[in-house]
Image (cartoon, rainbow, N blue to C red):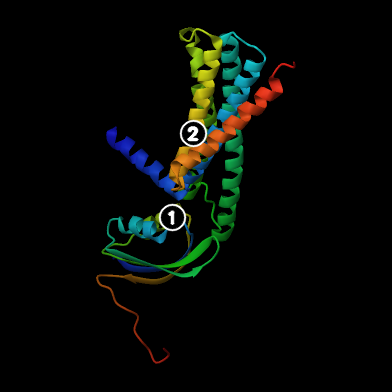
Amino acid sequence: MKHRISDLLQQFHQYGKLANVAEIARRYFAMNAFDGALTMIGVLMGNFTAGVDTPRIVVSTGLATSVAMGISGLWGAYLTEAAERKREITEISEQVLIDLHDTRIGKASRFAVAVVAVVDGISPALAALIILSPFFIADLFGQIQFVYFSALGMALLSLFALGAFLGTVSKENVFLYGLRTVVAGLVSIGISYLLGAPGE
Amino acid sequence: MSNIRRLVLDTLKPHEPSIIELAKSISDLEGIAAVNISIYEIDRKVENAKITIEGENVLYPLVLDIITDMGGTVHSVDEVVAGSKIIDDASTLQD
Protein backbone atom coordinates (compact mmCIF):
# COMPACT_ATOMS: atom_id res chain seq x y z
CA MET A 1 0.00 0.00 0.00
CA LYS A 2 2.83 2.34 0.99
CA HIS A 3 4.64 1.42 -2.23
CA ARG A 4 1.56 2.21 -4.32
CA ILE A 5 1.11 5.61 -2.68
CA SER A 6 4.77 6.37 -3.22
CA ASP A 7 4.45 5.35 -6.90
CA LEU A 8 1.36 7.52 -7.27
CA LEU A 9 3.08 10.52 -5.73
CA GLN A 10 6.06 10.01 -8.00
CA GLN A 11 3.74 9.86 -10.98
CA PHE A 12 2.01 13.09 -9.91
CA HIS A 13 5.41 14.70 -9.50
CA GLN A 14 6.32 13.66 -13.05
CA TYR A 15 3.03 14.96 -14.42
CA GLY A 16 3.53 18.20 -12.53
CA LYS A 17 6.97 18.69 -14.07
CA LEU A 18 5.78 17.75 -17.53
CA ALA A 19 2.80 20.10 -17.45
CA ASN A 20 4.62 22.90 -15.61
CA VAL A 21 1.95 22.89 -12.94
CA ALA A 22 3.92 24.58 -10.15
CA GLU A 23 4.36 27.89 -11.95
CA ILE A 24 0.74 28.09 -13.11
CA ALA A 25 -0.65 27.02 -9.75
CA ARG A 26 1.48 29.66 -7.98
CA ARG A 27 0.20 32.34 -10.30
CA TYR A 28 -3.44 31.34 -9.85
CA PHE A 29 -3.01 31.02 -6.09
CA ALA A 30 -1.57 34.52 -5.68
CA MET A 31 -4.02 36.15 -8.09
CA ASN A 32 -7.10 34.56 -6.61
CA ALA A 33 -6.14 34.85 -2.97
CA PHE A 34 -5.61 38.56 -3.68
CA ASP A 35 -9.07 38.72 -5.27
CA GLY A 36 -10.56 36.90 -2.32
CA ALA A 37 -8.95 39.23 0.21
CA LEU A 38 -10.07 42.40 -1.54
CA THR A 39 -13.57 41.07 -2.12
CA MET A 40 -13.88 40.29 1.55
CA ILE A 41 -12.65 43.80 2.40
CA GLY A 42 -15.51 45.04 0.23
CA VAL A 43 -18.00 42.83 2.08
CA LEU A 44 -16.71 43.98 5.48
CA MET A 45 -16.70 47.65 4.55
CA GLY A 46 -20.16 47.37 3.03
CA ASN A 47 -21.50 45.86 6.24
CA PHE A 48 -19.57 48.32 8.40
CA THR A 49 -20.76 51.45 6.64
CA ALA A 50 -24.31 50.07 6.53
CA GLY A 51 -24.16 49.82 10.31
CA VAL A 52 -24.54 46.02 10.52
CA ASP A 53 -23.82 45.12 14.11
CA THR A 54 -24.91 41.47 14.12
CA PRO A 55 -21.94 39.16 13.53
CA ARG A 56 -24.25 36.45 12.15
CA ILE A 57 -25.22 38.71 9.23
CA VAL A 58 -21.61 39.47 8.38
CA VAL A 59 -20.72 35.77 8.65
CA SER A 60 -23.63 34.77 6.36
CA THR A 61 -22.71 37.39 3.77
CA GLY A 62 -19.06 36.52 4.02
CA LEU A 63 -19.57 32.76 3.76
CA ALA A 64 -21.90 33.12 0.80
CA THR A 65 -19.32 35.32 -0.90
CA SER A 66 -16.53 32.82 -0.10
CA VAL A 67 -18.53 29.97 -1.58
CA ALA A 68 -19.33 31.98 -4.68
CA MET A 69 -15.69 32.93 -5.14
CA GLY A 70 -14.61 29.33 -4.65
CA ILE A 71 -17.07 28.02 -7.21
CA SER A 72 -16.22 30.82 -9.61
CA GLY A 73 -12.52 30.08 -9.25
CA LEU A 74 -12.90 26.33 -9.62
CA TRP A 75 -15.28 26.45 -12.56
CA GLY A 76 -13.56 29.28 -14.36
CA ALA A 77 -10.10 27.80 -14.01
CA TYR A 78 -11.32 24.35 -15.02
CA LEU A 79 -12.94 25.60 -18.21
CA THR A 80 -10.11 27.97 -19.12
CA GLU A 81 -7.27 25.61 -18.37
CA ALA A 82 -9.01 22.65 -20.01
CA ALA A 83 -9.54 24.68 -23.19
CA GLU A 84 -5.93 25.88 -23.29
CA ARG A 85 -4.51 22.43 -22.64
CA LYS A 86 -6.76 20.84 -25.21
CA ARG A 87 -5.60 23.35 -27.81
CA GLU A 88 -1.97 22.62 -26.99
CA ILE A 89 -2.48 18.84 -27.12
CA THR A 90 -4.34 19.13 -30.43
CA GLU A 91 -1.48 21.18 -31.89
CA ILE A 92 1.08 18.56 -30.90
CA SER A 93 -1.21 15.73 -32.04
CA GLU A 94 -1.39 17.29 -35.47
CA GLN A 95 2.39 17.26 -35.65
CA VAL A 96 3.01 13.72 -34.40
CA LEU A 97 -0.18 12.32 -35.98
CA ILE A 98 -1.22 10.26 -32.95
CA ASP A 99 -3.96 10.64 -30.36
CA LEU A 100 -2.20 11.88 -27.24
CA HIS A 101 -5.17 11.36 -24.89
CA ASP A 102 -3.82 8.20 -23.22
CA THR A 103 -0.16 9.15 -23.35
CA ARG A 104 1.84 10.65 -20.52
CA ILE A 105 1.28 14.08 -22.05
CA GLY A 106 -2.49 13.66 -22.09
CA LYS A 107 -2.55 12.43 -18.50
CA ALA A 108 -0.22 15.23 -17.34
CA SER A 109 -2.48 17.74 -19.04
CA ARG A 110 -5.60 16.45 -17.25
CA PHE A 111 -3.71 16.38 -13.97
CA ALA A 112 -2.68 20.01 -14.46
CA VAL A 113 -6.28 21.06 -15.16
CA ALA A 114 -7.47 19.39 -11.95
CA VAL A 115 -4.73 20.88 -9.79
CA VAL A 116 -5.11 24.38 -11.18
CA ALA A 117 -8.91 24.27 -10.80
CA VAL A 118 -8.64 23.18 -7.16
CA VAL A 119 -6.03 25.85 -6.37
CA ASP A 120 -8.10 28.48 -8.10
CA GLY A 121 -11.18 27.44 -6.16
CA ILE A 122 -9.58 27.09 -2.77
CA SER A 123 -7.36 30.19 -2.73
CA PRO A 124 -10.01 32.96 -2.74
CA ALA A 125 -12.28 30.98 -0.41
CA LEU A 126 -9.45 30.36 2.02
CA ALA A 127 -8.37 34.00 2.02
CA ALA A 128 -11.97 35.05 2.63
CA LEU A 129 -12.42 32.60 5.50
CA ILE A 130 -9.22 33.70 7.19
CA ILE A 131 -10.33 37.32 7.02
CA LEU A 132 -13.80 36.46 8.28
CA SER A 133 -12.47 34.42 11.22
CA PRO A 134 -12.80 37.16 13.92
CA PHE A 135 -16.54 37.11 13.30
CA PHE A 136 -16.70 33.42 14.21
CA ILE A 137 -15.49 34.35 17.70
CA ALA A 138 -17.17 37.78 17.85
CA ASP A 139 -18.42 37.17 21.42
CA LEU A 140 -14.85 37.40 22.68
CA PHE A 141 -14.44 40.94 21.38
CA GLY A 142 -17.15 42.86 23.19
CA GLN A 143 -17.88 45.66 20.74
CA ILE A 144 -18.68 44.92 17.10
CA GLN A 145 -16.27 47.64 15.92
CA PHE A 146 -13.34 45.68 17.33
CA VAL A 147 -14.46 42.65 15.36
CA TYR A 148 -14.52 44.69 12.16
CA PHE A 149 -11.12 46.18 12.90
CA SER A 150 -9.68 42.75 13.63
CA ALA A 151 -11.10 41.34 10.43
CA LEU A 152 -9.72 44.25 8.42
CA GLY A 153 -6.42 43.78 10.22
CA MET A 154 -6.47 40.11 9.18
CA ALA A 155 -7.16 41.24 5.63
CA LEU A 156 -4.17 43.58 5.56
CA LEU A 157 -1.99 40.92 7.15
CA SER A 158 -3.11 38.39 4.55
CA LEU A 159 -2.36 40.86 1.79
CA PHE A 160 1.10 41.47 3.23
CA ALA A 161 1.74 37.73 3.46
CA LEU A 162 0.65 37.34 -0.15
CA GLY A 163 2.92 40.14 -1.26
CA ALA A 164 5.80 38.67 0.70
CA PHE A 165 5.14 35.30 -0.97
CA LEU A 166 5.33 36.97 -4.38
CA GLY A 167 8.51 38.74 -3.31
CA THR A 168 10.04 35.37 -2.39
CA VAL A 169 9.00 33.91 -5.73
CA SER A 170 10.50 36.79 -7.69
CA LYS A 171 13.53 37.01 -5.37
CA GLU A 172 12.84 40.70 -4.78
CA ASN A 173 12.55 42.63 -1.51
CA VAL A 174 9.92 40.71 0.42
CA PHE A 175 8.97 43.64 2.65
CA LEU A 176 8.45 46.05 -0.25
CA TYR A 177 6.37 43.51 -2.14
CA GLY A 178 4.25 42.98 0.96
CA LEU A 179 3.74 46.73 1.29
CA ARG A 180 2.54 46.98 -2.32
CA THR A 181 -0.27 44.54 -1.72
CA VAL A 182 -1.18 46.16 1.59
CA VAL A 183 -1.56 49.50 -0.20
CA ALA A 184 -4.20 47.93 -2.45
CA GLY A 185 -6.09 46.85 0.65
CA LEU A 186 -5.83 50.31 2.24
CA VAL A 187 -7.06 51.99 -0.95
CA SER A 188 -9.99 49.58 -1.07
CA ILE A 189 -10.86 50.29 2.57
CA GLY A 190 -10.54 54.05 2.06
CA ILE A 191 -12.70 54.26 -1.04
CA SER A 192 -15.32 51.85 0.36
CA TYR A 193 -15.55 53.95 3.52
CA LEU A 194 -15.97 57.17 1.56
CA LEU A 195 -18.63 55.60 -0.65
CA GLY A 196 -20.56 54.19 2.25
CA ALA A 197 -20.08 56.91 4.87
CA PRO A 198 -23.39 58.51 5.92
CA GLY A 199 -23.98 62.05 4.59
CA GLU A 200 -23.67 65.02 6.94
CA MET B 1 14.12 -17.37 -32.41
CA SER B 2 17.09 -15.00 -32.30
CA ASN B 3 17.12 -11.69 -30.48
CA ILE B 4 17.28 -8.16 -31.81
CA ARG B 5 20.55 -6.67 -30.63
CA ARG B 6 20.46 -3.24 -32.20
CA LEU B 7 17.67 -0.96 -33.36
CA VAL B 8 17.98 2.45 -34.95
CA LEU B 9 14.73 4.41 -35.06
CA ASP B 10 13.84 7.70 -36.67
CA THR B 11 11.24 9.31 -34.41
CA LEU B 12 9.23 12.48 -34.01
CA LYS B 13 8.43 13.60 -30.47
CA PRO B 14 7.20 16.64 -28.56
CA HIS B 15 9.85 18.64 -26.68
CA GLU B 16 8.56 17.37 -23.36
CA PRO B 17 9.20 14.77 -22.02
CA SER B 18 12.85 15.42 -22.86
CA ILE B 19 15.20 12.92 -24.50
CA ILE B 20 16.80 12.42 -21.08
CA GLU B 21 13.58 10.96 -19.70
CA LEU B 22 13.00 9.00 -22.88
CA ALA B 23 16.48 7.51 -22.79
CA LYS B 24 16.13 6.61 -19.10
CA SER B 25 12.76 4.95 -19.65
CA ILE B 26 13.94 2.89 -22.62
CA SER B 27 17.19 1.87 -20.91
CA ASP B 28 15.19 0.66 -17.89
CA LEU B 29 13.64 -2.06 -20.03
CA GLU B 30 14.95 -5.60 -19.56
CA GLY B 31 17.37 -6.75 -22.18
CA ILE B 32 18.56 -3.27 -23.08
CA ALA B 33 22.18 -2.39 -22.38
CA ALA B 34 22.40 1.14 -23.77
CA VAL B 35 20.43 3.88 -25.50
CA ASN B 36 21.71 6.75 -27.60
CA ILE B 37 19.37 9.55 -28.62
CA SER B 38 20.36 12.49 -30.74
CA ILE B 39 18.25 15.36 -32.04
CA TYR B 40 18.79 16.28 -35.65
CA GLU B 41 15.94 18.70 -36.22
CA ILE B 42 13.90 20.98 -33.96
CA ASP B 43 10.56 22.56 -34.67
CA ARG B 44 8.38 24.87 -32.58
CA LYS B 45 6.47 22.03 -30.94
CA VAL B 46 8.30 18.84 -31.91
CA GLU B 47 11.77 17.46 -32.59
CA ASN B 48 13.20 14.68 -34.72
CA ALA B 49 15.27 12.18 -32.79
CA LYS B 50 17.45 9.28 -33.86
CA ILE B 51 17.28 6.55 -31.25
CA THR B 52 19.91 3.83 -31.18
CA ILE B 53 19.25 0.93 -28.84
CA GLU B 54 21.55 -1.97 -28.10
CA GLY B 55 21.21 -4.95 -25.80
CA GLU B 56 20.95 -8.70 -25.42
CA ASN B 57 17.27 -8.70 -26.35
CA VAL B 58 15.67 -5.49 -27.58
CA LEU B 59 11.90 -5.91 -27.56
CA TYR B 60 10.54 -3.51 -30.15
CA PRO B 61 6.87 -3.52 -28.96
CA LEU B 62 7.96 -2.40 -25.49
CA VAL B 63 10.21 0.30 -26.91
CA LEU B 64 7.33 1.46 -29.11
CA ASP B 65 5.01 1.60 -26.10
CA ILE B 66 7.41 3.90 -24.28
CA ILE B 67 7.92 6.17 -27.28
CA THR B 68 4.14 6.40 -27.82
CA ASP B 69 3.49 6.99 -24.12
CA MET B 70 5.80 9.99 -24.32
CA GLY B 71 3.85 11.37 -27.26
CA GLY B 72 6.29 10.29 -29.96
CA THR B 73 5.94 8.34 -33.18
CA VAL B 74 8.35 6.14 -35.08
CA HIS B 75 8.82 7.45 -38.60
CA SER B 76 10.96 4.52 -39.68
CA VAL B 77 13.13 1.67 -38.46
CA ASP B 78 16.43 2.61 -40.07
CA GLU B 79 18.59 -0.26 -38.90
CA VAL B 80 18.11 -3.63 -37.26
CA VAL B 81 20.75 -6.08 -36.11
CA ALA B 82 19.55 -9.49 -34.98
CA GLY B 83 21.37 -12.69 -34.10
CA SER B 84 24.04 -13.75 -31.69
CA LYS B 85 26.26 -10.74 -32.25
CA ILE B 86 26.23 -7.19 -33.62
CA ILE B 87 27.60 -6.58 -37.08
CA ASP B 88 27.75 -3.40 -39.11
CA ASP B 89 26.56 -3.21 -42.68
CA ALA B 90 29.22 -4.38 -45.15
CA SER B 91 30.69 -1.77 -47.45
CA THR B 92 30.30 -2.34 -51.15
CA LEU B 93 31.71 -0.69 -54.25
CA GLN B 94 28.41 1.17 -54.64
CA ASP B 95 29.06 2.97 -51.33
Q: Amino acid at mark 2?
A: Phe
Which of discs 1 and 2 lies nearer the camera? The answer is: 2
Residue in the image at 49% along x and 70% along y: B41
Chain label for disc 2? A
Residue A160 image label: 2
* Image x and y of residue A46, in percent: 65, 19
Q: Residues within 10 Å of mark 2 (few under 14, many from 20)?
A: many
Q: CA distance from mark 1 to mark 2?
A: 38 Å
User: What secondary structure is found at the residue carrying circle 2?
Assistant: helix
Residue B17 image label: 1
Whether residue A11 is visible = yes
Residue in the image at 52% along x and 28% along y: A156
Q: Is residue B79 left or right of residue B73?
A: left
| In the rendered image, the vertical position of residue A141 relative to residue A6, given as above or below | above
Q: Is residue B16 left or right of residue A148?
A: left
* Image x and y of residue A45, in percent: 62, 21
| In the rendered image, the vertical position of residue A44 relative to residue A159, given as above or below | above
Q: Quadrant of residue B8?
A: bottom left
Image quadrant in which the N terminus of chain A is located = top left
Q: Quadrant of residue B6?
A: bottom left
What is the residue that sits farthest to the front in this orientation?
A200
All told, the count of numbered labels is 2
Residue nearer the viewer, A4 or B74: A4
Q: Is residue A157 left or right of residue B2?
A: right
Residue nearer the viewer, B62 or A133: A133
User: What secondary structure is found at the residue carrying circle 1?
Assistant: loop
* Image x and y of residue B44, in percent: 55, 63
What is the residue that sits farthest to the bottom in this orientation?
B93
* Image x and y of residue B90, in percent: 34, 84
| In the rendered image, the vertical position of residue A49 relative to residue A177, given as above or below | above
